[in-house]
Image: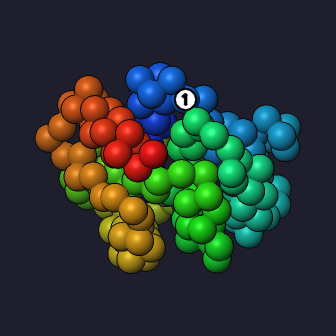
Amino acid sequence: MMGSGKTTVGREAARALGYRFVDLDKAIERSSGQTVPEIFEKHGENHFRLLETRTLAEFAGANRVLVSAGGGAPLADGNIELMRRIGTVVYLRASGQLLRHRLGGSGGRPMLHGNLDERIEELRAEREPVYESADFTLNVDGLSLLEIVGEVKRIAEMSQ
């Protein structure tokens, strides 16, 4: 889920593991020459989701890479399987309260239009069943970045 710490945790965990770090949204922006909000505005969400799947597929089977996927990436058919071909899938679960705190000033996020509290709860209700299919779920509330990174590192080492 957006705001759960995927990019921050991913970057630090990749560093701790000696892995290459890939932020899926940034990879899409580089390859398309457009920002995520521009892609949503000009081409719509469906086009963006197609780009997510194509970009994920580029990393399937790669070694020693940690991909921070956008919050909607697991929802498309086949994307969880693509993610598993990259490696172990870890869901960083954050409470609605933590997400609201982190996303309160998040302008430019295409999926956060309207009332922030309502939108977060709508997205969580829609996405949670898919997120729960991850190989591991890590509750991040109350944990420091160092603690979360340590858990992700432990999971990655245990899964090798």
Q: Residue at x 26, y 58 (%)?
A: 96
User: x, y (%) of residue 46?
Assistant: 74, 69
Q: Which residue is mark 1?
A: 19
User: x, y (%) of residue 8?
Assistant: 43, 31
Q: Residue at x 83, y 40 (%)?
A: 31
Can the viewer see residue 55 in this picture? Answer: no
Residue 120 sits in quarter: bottom left
Q: Nearer the viewer, residue 36 or 49?
A: 49
Task: Answer above or below: position of 69 versus 123.
Answer: above
Number of marks in picture: 1
Quick check: 109 left or right of 128?
Answer: right
User: x, y (%) of residue 142?
Assistant: 14, 41
Can the viewer see residue 96 in this picture? Answer: yes
Quick check: 66 left or right of 62?
Answer: left
Quick check: 148 left or right of 49?
Answer: left
Q: Residue at x 68, y 44 (%)?
A: 62
Q: Residue at x 53, y 44 (%)?
A: 68
Residue 25 sits in quarter: top right
- How does the figure colour the protein chain or chains? rainbow
Q: Quadrant of the N terminus?
A: bottom left
Task: Answer above or below: position of 101 versus 127.
Answer: above
User: x, y (%) of residue 18?
Assistant: 51, 23
Q: Nearer the viewer, residue 34 or 7?
A: 7
Q: SS for tag 1?
A: loop
Q: Residues within 10 Å of mark 1 (few under 14, many from 20)?
A: some
Q: Nearer the viewer, residue 158 or 68?
A: 158
The amino acid at mark 1 is Tyr
Q: Quadrant of the C terminus?
A: top left
